[in-house]
Amino acid sequence: MKNKKGFTLIEMLIVITIIAVLASLILVGMGGAQARSRDSRRIADLHNMMNALELYNSKHGLYPDYKQGKIASADDWDNFTKDLKPETGVSSFPRDPLSTTKYFYRYVASDELTDYILAAVLEQENPALRETEEETVLGISCGISHMTYCIRP
């Protein structure tokens, strides 16, 4: 009788099943890490956007004229940043990592254009939210109860 080397079909199926179970467990465990990573990017993006708005302010003496309620979707954010490009010299502006109807960036200026607020809805509770006061500023509700991170000059 010859010695046959190799794996049987049953052994191969068992190994594939074990690998699939382990891979699914790892992917489920990483879901929270991915959301935290996107939230960290959102916070960093808002701070970068703040720098661009300060460039605009130093050139014009006021902040851009996008009034309360005007920024309401990802498309509006794209138009807003498109209008800012020639005014600031910044070649690209951040977009929310998901850019859905729930997650997008907001910018609202005061009536006098001397103040503004930048906001992003976060996916998970973040220590940065605890640093944000629970308040409504220029029509945007900020703080941990709304999961909205806000910054202003």
Image (cartoon, rainbow, N blue to C red):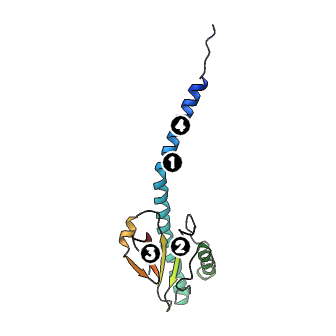
Instruction: State the CA–CA distance, disc 1 to disc 3.
Output: 31 Å
Which of discs 1 and 3 lies nearer the camera? The answer is 1
Secondary structure beneath label 3: strand
Image coordinates for residue 57, horizontal then vertical, percent: 52, 85
| Residue 19 tag number | 4
Q: Could you classify mark 1 by the number of other residues whose Cα lies within 10 Å: few (under 14), some (14-19), or many (20 or more)? A: few
Give whichever of discs 1 and 3 has the lower sequence position: 1
Q: Depth check: give the residue in front, 77 or 90.
A: 77
> Which quadrant: the C terminus?
bottom left
Image coordinates for residue 95, horizontal then vertical, percent: 57, 69
- Against 26, residue 61 (above or below) is below
> Which quadrant: the N terminus?
top right
- Name the residue that disc number 2 marks: 105
- Name the residue that disc number 1 marks: 27
Q: Are marks 4 and 2 in contact (CB under 8 Å)?
A: no
Secondary structure beneath label 1: helix
Q: Amino acid at mark 2?
A: Tyr
Instruction: State the CA–CA distance, disc 4 to disc 3.
Output: 43 Å
Give whichever of discs 4 and 2 has the lower sequence position: 4
Q: Amino acid at mark 1?
A: Leu
Q: Are marks 2 and 3 in contact (CB under 8 Å)?
A: no
Give whichever of discs 2 and 3 has the lower sequence position: 2
Image coordinates for residue 9, horizontal then vertical, percent: 61, 25
Q: Residue at x 51, y 48 (%)?
A: 27
Q: Residue at x 46, y 55 (%)?
A: 33
Q: Depth check: give the residue in front, 81 or 67.
A: 67
Q: Amino acid at mark 4?
A: Ile
Q: Could you classify mark 4 by the number of other residues whose Cα lies within 10 Å: few (under 14), some (14-19), or many (20 or more)? A: few
Secondary structure beneath label 2: strand
Q: Could you classify mark 2 by the number of other residues whose Cα lies within 10 Å: few (under 14), some (14-19), or many (20 or more)? A: many
- Name the residue that disc number 3 marks: 150
Q: Amino acid at mark 3?
A: Cys
